[in-house]
Image (cartoon, coloured by chain):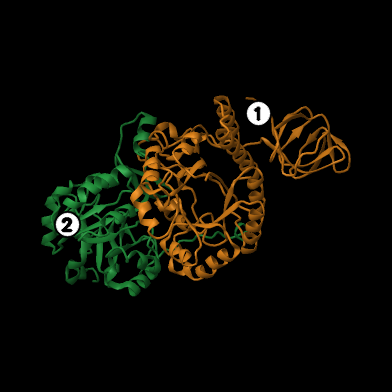
Amino acid sequence: MAYQLVLGKMKNKIIITINNLEDKEKYQTLGINLFAYPLKEFCVGIPNTFAWDVLDKDSYAFLNRIMDNKAIDELKEILPKLNVKGIIFDDLGVLELVKDMPFEKILYLSHFNTNVLSIELYLKYVDYVIISSDITKEETEYIVRCLKDKVILNALGYYPAMYSRRLLIDNYSKFHHIEKENPLVIENTQKKFMVYENEYGTVFYHMPLYNGLELMNLSAKYYFINTSFLTFEDIKKLLNNEYTEEYDTGFLYQETIYKLRGEEND
Amino acid sequence: MTELLAPAGDLERLKIAYLYGADAVYIGGRDYSLRANAKNFSLEEIKEATNFAHTLGKKIYVTVNIVFHDKNLKDLDNYLQTLKDYSVDAIIASDIVVVSKASKINLDVILSTQSSILNYSAIKFWQSLGVKRFVLGREASREDIIRIKKECQAELECFIHGAMCTSISGKCILSNYMTNRDSNRGGCAQICRWVFTTENKPDFTFMSKDLNMVTYIKDMLDIGVNSFKVEGRMRSIYYIATVIKCYREVIDKIKNNTLTKNDEIYYEKILDRVANRDTMPQFYQKFPGVNESYFNDRIEVSNQDFLGIVTGYKDGLIELEQRNYFKIGYIVEFIGPNMENITYTIKTIIDENNETLDVARHPQMKIYLPYDKPLPKYAMMRLKTIV
């Protein structure tokens, strides 16, 4: 029942990545109008990316790479020409470049941004912060209560569990002299990850996909959906609560531990 | 400024690190540190360690580098003020809330490698918050370091030796998913050393070999790296002594313009023997490929070279605490702070009851070895390395 909200008044609060331009029109039929375009030279772990000049004034540029100097130099060239509604990024080097630019700045610092004070500090420099999904629902609710419409929540999509600069599938395939499979699904103790590589590195995504649509009942500014490795039909079913495949809720109900019991920690 | 920076998981290792040549040591407290399953330091021990460091005229840094959840913030102000009161030289942090709170009380911050910095623009952001020193991501290439130095004139701290995360630091929560242990709050279970299966291909592993920069230290000095950081707060005293002594000698010889190619080969062999994994330069000179990682054929070697630690000298006898099996006839080597290595053939072993033995079998047993000159406390006896 709660998910019907998504297609009701909440539809205006979704920022969704797209895998191709045709999907944009399809999502518009659902009433979703905020689109994030993963930029080709500045994204990792995303199969479908776009050249910067495809973006229009209603779109968000999405950049999730940790940038080296060369990438920063390239971005510096592009930024003045970028006519967008906003930019979503991970690397704080990007923040330094865009802090005085006239579009929305959204900080998506992957596994950081897990407490109110840190987010408040970053909000001095950006318009919105995407809260990490490494924390529990209770912790998320507390942050949203404190910061309300200055924060954005991950709502749906495969969630990154690891990002390496190395070309891990490439190295593995070369070592074993086997055909490269990208993405590659790996498993240990019934835990699965989808590994995807491009020239900028390798990302491990936890499987099954993360479904945090229940968080849309909170009063965050936007809800972020990453559609990588998913189809429009998948997303539509998920939004309508008709998805029959497996999904999980990440750490919403699973608090992580970090101090081990026993003498070592005494 | 050039600094050799050592890790220490407890007071004994800290003292060893300084004695063997570290200019500075970094330690973790029992809260807020990323190696939650290291023994780590109580507040009292941090105070003692800081006093010890400053007595020697050396520096000490404390890691406060977890990613904070709201409930972890409760005692942070008091903790930082206590570190300030103890006069630690800096903290190592990555979360902006720690940087902000520390700067308010004029406690210096070194930005942790957890912040994943590979570009000059990110450094400029943190400089605007008052951070002066940066631990670059282990993925930084030589060109990256040169450019960052040129653009920012920042103090740069670079890892030169030890284990590598496969992930960019701060970008991995595999441990959270696999073991429910939060890697960014000190619970990392090192999932990158696990073996994964695939549906129809060979097992998938993605473990990096370790880092070793002996042959690039001179170049790193030339391009302006300030602090040379050794990884390993959970490593043994023998590992710390050996690695720090090697790099101390390398740096000193470079400064005296006496380092030879043969020296480099010698130090690499010594370092290889103390390591339990292969070591290599990784990202510095070229992009790492197949050769820089392990696949299914990894063999982790348990090192038995460390035979004992010198605890005293009296009446022509070295007093030694045994750490690994040795016997009459072994050719060993004593290494120690401020001394040349001494080669020694074991001809007599005497125990606490003044009885002679053929073999020293028991770890931590007291052993006496005849020698005509005193050896310093904390000198170590190891198997002679043939190079």
Say which of marks 1 and 2 sits in front: 2
- Chain letter, orange in picture: B
The type of residue carrying mark 1 is: Thr
SS for dot 2:
loop
Horizontal side of B318 relative to B123 (left or right) equals right
Front residue of A140/B32: it is: B32
Which chain comes out green in the rendered image? A
Chain under callout 1: B
Residue B70 lies in what quarter of the image? bottom left
Q: Residue B273: name its quadrant.
A: top right
Query: For this rendering, which residue is in front, A243 or B365?
Result: B365
Looking at the rendered structure, which numbered label has been put on residue B385?
1
**Above or below, B317 relative to B94:** above
- Per the image, the residue denoted by label 2 is A84
Any part of residue A245 in sight: no
Residue B224 location in percent, x, y? 45, 41
Asked if residue B117 is positioned above or below residue B351 in the image, the reply reads below
- Above or below A183: residue B50: below
Alpha carbon of mark 1 to alpha carbon of mark 2: how far?
63 Å
> Please, what is the three-letter code of the amino acid marked with disc 2?
Val
